[in-house]
Amino acid sequence: MNNNDISQIRSLIDRFMEAETSIAEEKRLSDYFASGNVAEELLPYREMFGWYDSLSQESNPDTGRQPEKATRMRILPLKLWQWASIAAMTALLFTAGLYLRTSAEDINDTYLAYQGSYIVRDGKKITDLSIVVPEAERIERELEARLSDLDNQIEDVDNRINASITSGLDMDNPLVSAIMDDALN
């Protein structure tokens, strides 16, 4: 086969991929790839056209070929479906990657704050941050709760002291009231 014939076959393959070939052109491609004389550079297409030809023969056993409209309709939706699949997978992968990246950054930031920390359980030093971090956070919550209780108790004591200091004084007198406000604050 000469270079001109190979060029024509390549052109037909391109038109086939764009669903622009006629039944006669598809038959020419089918016959070319079914022959034993396929150019080496076009061998990767042989299996695809063999599969396509077997589909055409199964769909219309009388002639072995589909009508022109049916052939074109079979190719176009497949291409549209492929593009839709690629777009959907790209969007899914982008979203999952963004989520995982954000989650990993949050986890890394949390773990960086506890870098070098450890706990001791049953006499064993544990440095695994997946164990240390939750334990440290639990202890931190307990400490905050105890400090809040302590603040409430101190405020209560302070209020009682102020009440006992001012109990014997005439707080209705503006001068006494001003002096006590300055002294207590």
Image: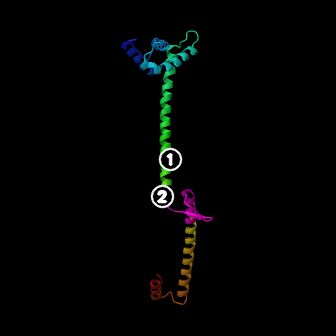
**Left-right relation of 65 to 175:** right
Q: Residue furthest right?
A: 122
* Residue occupying the point 47% across, 37% down: 90
- Asked if the stretch drawn in magenta spans residue 141, the answer is no
* Residue occupying the point 48% across, 15% down: 33
Q: Is residue 159 above or below residue 78?
A: below
**Left-right relation of 7 to 134:** left
* Residue indicated by mark 1: 100
Residue situated in front as seen by the camera: 146 or 13? 13
Determine whether the residue tagged by mark 1 lies in a helix, strand or loop: helix
Determine whether the residue tagged by mark 2 lies in a helix, strand or loop: helix
Q: Residue furthest front?
A: 124
* Quarter of the picture holding the N terminus: top left
C-alpha gap between disc 2 and disc 1: 18 Å
Give me the disc on residue 112.
2
Find the magenta span and give its range.
Answer: 111-140
Query: Which x, y percent locates residue 50?
Result: 52, 17
Question: Which image quadrant is residue 167 in?
Answer: bottom right
* Residue occupying the point 54% across, 81% down: 158
